[in-house]
Amino acid sequence: GVSILDAVDEAGYYDQPHLTRALRQWVGYTPAQILHADDVDIET
């Protein structure tokens, strides 16, 4: 697997909090919520 820091860097974000804020604003969930959820409804 890929580390979170590698994923953050590859996605072009400055750091993990930057990615977390952007993801929460975009889909309404943090990465941890998505990772641990049984059924997260993400609309694109």
Image (tube, rainbow, N blue to C red):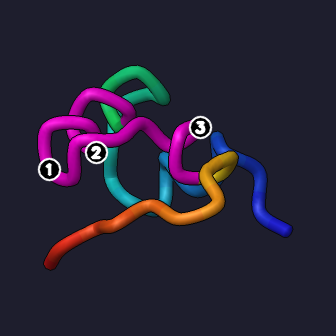
In magenta segment, residue 28: yes
Question: Residues at badges 1 and 2 in contact (C-beta under 8 Å)?
Answer: yes
Looking at the image, residue 5 sits to the left or right of residue 39; the answer is right
- Which span of residues is magenta-colored? 20-34
- Secondary structure, magenta segment, majority class: helix
Percent coordinates x, y for residue 37 in the rendering? 61, 51
Percent coordinates x, y for residue 13 in the rendering? 33, 42
Q: Which residue is mark 2?
A: 23
In magenta segment, residue 23: yes
Say which residue appears at 64% left-offset and 52% top-offset. 35
Report how far apart the C-alphas of labels 3 and 1 lie in the structure. Answer: 15 Å
Relative to residue 13, is residue 16 depicted above or below? above
Mark linked to residue 26? 1
Mark 1 closeness class: few <14, some 14–19, many ≥20 residues within 10 Å: few
Mark linked to residue 16? none
Lower sequence index among marks 3 and 1: 1
Q: Nearer the viewer, residue 8 or 41?
A: 41
Q: Residue furthest front?
A: 39
Mark linked to residue 32? 3
Q: Nearer the viewer, residue 19 or 26?
A: 26
Mark 3 closeness class: few <14, some 14–19, many ≥20 residues within 10 Å: few
Percent coordinates x, y for residue 39 in the rendering? 53, 65
